[in-house]
Every structure is written in structure tokens, then in C-alpha cells.
Image (tube, rainbow, N blue to C red):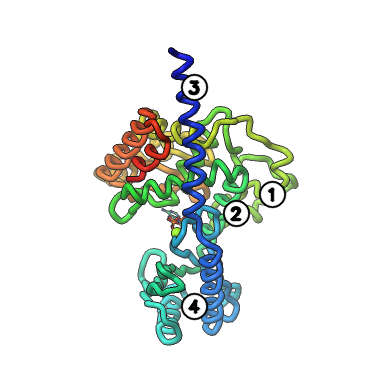
């Protein structure tokens, strides 16, 4: 009977929400891990200051945005406040030498990469069973800002936003569709897809659009421009709580089911651009669909996710035709598993992350 179907569906969703919370909690970094990472950051900062006394070493990416899983990599960014400073590639070379001499890290300087970085790793030890992997870059101020933007979105509704994002991060790693080098999508890309969904697809929205909210005081253009990009967003989340509340009451399970259905079935991959800043855009209107350079633009723009600040930058430009085919296949698989509503929610969760 319809009413019985209805209740079995409700029961599945309630149980699945509970499973998601419990699953995600045990994947969070431990306190010890956070302490070790902060110690490593301080140690590295001290060493860098022997080369550049005016420098600061800041965390970005998942360690700083609230979407970190146990044993995730550390992304660090070195900011130098003095006027005369070495070039990023010289710094990478010098820092590489210094760390090689002074620490136990395995060091790999990449001074000639598009964004010069030093890659570090530490072997597993009893106190650190998974070791540490860390990238140090220089002057990547936009990355610090987009980290802060994602952190603010996480803070607005931690139970739903963080649970969804963390689950999807595990899911895409287990399903092996989280390798930009192999033609699939970065974690950053998946997080943007979740926020796009919660801001622009869900109706009523689960999250407000922080980049379009009016500022509380007049703000000069100078304050909000970084390398020619508008980086303003509403970042006073305490204040926001008093002014904005989502009228969407769906559970995290309902949202996740709908997320998979939307990206498996409804998102217009051929023509659409997911922009958390401006909503659904067209590839055409951004010049991301042109065939002019013998199809290369098209190949780079199979999947289009606009960076929140660098709006000419497609975050998912690494996703190849095959990569997108695989990702969409996985989204359909996930959607199918959830639509079949196994007897026990825990079974659905296990199947999803197989
Ligand atoms: P993980 O826990 O899997 O490392 P993460 O949240 O750290 O996930 P990453 O994909 O490692 O996400 O990205 C870290 C940061 O690097 C992002 O917050 C962003 O600032 C920057 N970044 C990563 N990929 C891109 C990209 N394709 N375009 C622009 N910035 C990126
Ligand atoms: Mg990272």
C-alpha cells in the first residue's frame, strides 16, 4: 500500500542519516593527529624564517576548512610580508636544501612546476601510523581565501554540510574517482559540487550564497580585490545566524540521495557550468565551449566547475572524457543503490563505499 511504502522509505532515510553521522565521526582526525600537524607546521615555520625572517606559514585546504579526514595531507602556504623577496622557485630550492639538511622529512622540491612547491613526507612511526604528507607553496593567497569561504559554508550548518562533504570525500576516494592526474576530479572540485547543490539546486536552499549577500558596511573595491579577482564574501557566520536561517528541513540522507540523483541524471554536463558564485551558467557564455583551438577547449571543459574567485578558471579542467564517463557511472551506481533501499541502511552505506 502507498502509505506503507511511504513509511518504509521514511524509516530507511532516518536510519541512513544515523549511519552517515556515525560513519563520518569515526573518520575524523584524532586530537593527537591535529596536535602533531600543528607542531609540524610550527617547526617548518621556524626553519623557513631562517631564510625569510618576515614569513608566515599558514594551513589551507582540508586541514583548515573543516573537511578533513583522518590522515589527510597537509597543505601549507608561505606568505612573505617583506617587499624584497626571493622568487618562489629560488625559495623552493633553498627551502628544499635546508629541510633536507635539518629534518627527517623526505624532501622533493619542484621549483619549476606551474605553482612551485616543496613536497615533504614522513615515514610511518608508532606515534604516527600513517606518516605525514605535506606540500608547501608560496604566496597562494587565493587558495587561503577559498579555504576560508569553504570553512564558512561548513560552519553554517555543520551537521548537514560537513557530513555530506566528508562522506562524499570517502566515497570518491574508495571508488577511485578522486585523481586529477588520472583524469578525475580533485577533492576541491567535489566540495564545490556539494555547495553548488546546496545553494543553487535545493529549493528551498540549505545554504545562502555568501558571495552575493550584501555587506554590513560599505567596502572599498581595494579591500575586496586580490590579483584582479573579487574575493568578497559574507564571512561573519555568527552574525549570519541571526539574519538567515534555512527553511529546508531535509535530513542529510535525503540530501545525499538527491545529490546523487541530480548529478547522475539532471545536471547538464554538455552545456552547464556549476558556479557557486552565480548559479548555473552556460559553457557558451563563458567561452568554454569553443571548438576554435581544434577541440582542446572542449577537451579541457568536459566538466565545468567555476572557481569561486578565479572565475576564468575551470576547477575541473583535468577531467577527461573517460574520467567524466567514469564519474557519471559512479554517480549512477550510487543513485541506483540508494533507490533500491536495501533492508538495512548500513548495507547501503557499505555498498556505496565498496
Ligand atoms: P584532501 O583532504 O583530499 O586533501 P582538500 O580539501 O585539501 O582535500 P584539495 O583538492 O587537496 O582539497 O585542495 C586543497 C586546496 O588547494 C583547495 O582548498 C584549493 O584552495 C586548492 N586547490 C586544489 N585544487 C584546485 C584546483 N583544481 N583549482 C584551484 N585550487 C585548487
Ligand atoms: Mg589537501
Q: In this view, does 101 lie to the left or right of 224?
A: left
Cα separation, mark 3 vs mark 2, equals: 52 Å
Nearest to viewer (mark 1 / mark 4): 1
Secondary structure beneath dot 4 equals loop
For residue 86, the mark is 4
Q: CB of mark 1 within 8 Å of CB of mark 4?
A: no
* Residue 39 % position (x, y): 55, 74
Quarter of the image containing the N terminus? top left
Q: In which quarter of the image is residue 161?
A: top right
Cα separation, mark 1 vs mark 4, equals: 35 Å
Secondary structure beneath dot 3 equals helix
- What residue did someone put label 2 on? 225
Residue drawn at x 47%, y 47% as measured from the top left: 23
* Residue 47 % position (x, y): 52, 81
- What residue did someone put label 1 on? 236
Q: Quadrant of residue 55?
A: bottom right
If you read the primary sequence from the N terminus, does the residue marked by circle 1 or circle 3 appear first? 3
Mark 2 closeness class: few <14, some 14–19, many ≥20 residues within 10 Å:
few
Cα separation, mark 2 vs mark 4, equals: 24 Å
Mark 4 closeness class: few <14, some 14–19, many ≥20 residues within 10 Å:
few
Mark 1 closeness class: few <14, some 14–19, many ≥20 residues within 10 Å:
few
Foreground residue among 227 and 341: 341
If you read the primary sequence from the N terminus, does the residue marked by circle 2 or circle 4 appear first? 4
Q: CB of mark 2 within 8 Å of CB of mark 4?
A: no
Cα separation, mark 3 vs mark 4, equals: 65 Å
Q: CB of mark 2 within 8 Å of CB of mark 1?
A: no
- What residue did someone put label 3 on? 7
Ligand 1 under 8 Å from disc 2 Cβ: no
* Residue 118 % position (x, y): 41, 72
Amino acid at each position: 500500500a502507498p502509505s506503507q511504502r511511504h513509511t518504509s522509505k521514511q524509516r530507511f532515510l532516518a536510519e541512513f542519516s544515523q549511519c552517515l553521522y556515525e560513519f563520518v565521526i569515526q573518520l575524523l582526525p584524532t586530537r593527537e593527529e591535529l596536535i602533531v600537524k600543528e607542531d609540524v607546521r610550527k617547526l617548518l615555520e621556524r626553519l623557513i624564517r631562517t631564510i625569510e625572517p618576515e614569513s608566515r606559514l599558514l594551513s589551507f585546504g582540508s586541514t583548515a576548512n573543516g573537511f578533513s579526514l583522518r590522515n589527510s595531507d597537509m597543505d601549507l602556504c608561505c606568505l612573505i610580508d617583506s617587499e624584497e623577496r626571493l622568487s618562489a622557485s629560488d625559495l623552493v630550492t633553498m627551502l628544499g636544501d635546508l629541510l633536507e639538511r635539518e629534518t627527517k622529512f623526505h624532501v622533493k622540491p619542484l621549483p619549476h612546476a606551474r605553482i612551485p612547491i616543496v613536497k615533504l613526507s614522513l615515514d610511518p612511526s608508532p606515534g604516527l601510523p600513517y606518516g605525514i604528507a605535506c606540500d608547501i607553496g608560496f604566496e597562494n593567497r587565493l587558495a587561503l581565501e577559498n579555504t576560508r569561504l569553504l570553512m564558512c559554508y561548513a560552519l553554517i550548518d555543520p551537521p548537514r554540510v560537513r557530513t555530506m562533504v566528508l562522506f562524499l570525500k570517502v566515497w570518491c576516494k574508495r571508488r577511485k574517482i578522486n585523481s586529477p592526474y588520472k583524469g578525475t576530479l580533485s577533492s576541491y572540485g567535489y566540495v564545490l559540487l556539494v555547495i553548488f547543490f546546496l545553494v543553487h539546486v535545493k529549493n528551498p536552499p540549505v545554504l545562502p550564497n555568501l558571495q552575493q549577500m550584501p555587506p554590513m558596511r560599505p567596502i572599498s573595491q581595494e579591500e575586496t580585490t586580490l590579483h584582479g579577482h573579487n574575493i568578497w564574501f559574507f564571512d561573519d557566520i555568527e552574525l549570519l545566524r541571526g539574519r538567515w536561517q534555512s527553511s529546508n528541513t531535509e535530513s542529510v540522507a535525503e540530501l545525499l540521495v538527491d545529490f546523487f540523483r541530480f548529478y547522475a541524471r539532471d545536471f547538464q554536463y554538455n552545456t552547464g557550468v556549476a558556479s557557486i558564485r552565480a548559479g548555473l551558467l552556460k559553457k557558451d557564455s563563458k567561452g568554454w565551449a569553443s571548438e576554435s583551438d581544434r577541440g582542446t577547449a572542449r577537451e579541457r571543459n568536459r566538466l565545468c566547475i567555476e572557481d569561486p574567485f578565479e572565475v576564468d578558471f575551470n576547477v575541473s579542467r583535468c577531467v577527461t572524457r573517460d574520467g567524466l564517463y567514469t564519474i557519471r557511472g559512479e554517480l549512477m551506481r550510487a543513485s541506483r543503490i540508494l533507490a533500491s533501499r536495501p533492508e538495512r541502511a548500513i548495507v547501503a552505506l557499505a555498498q556505496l563505499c565498496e
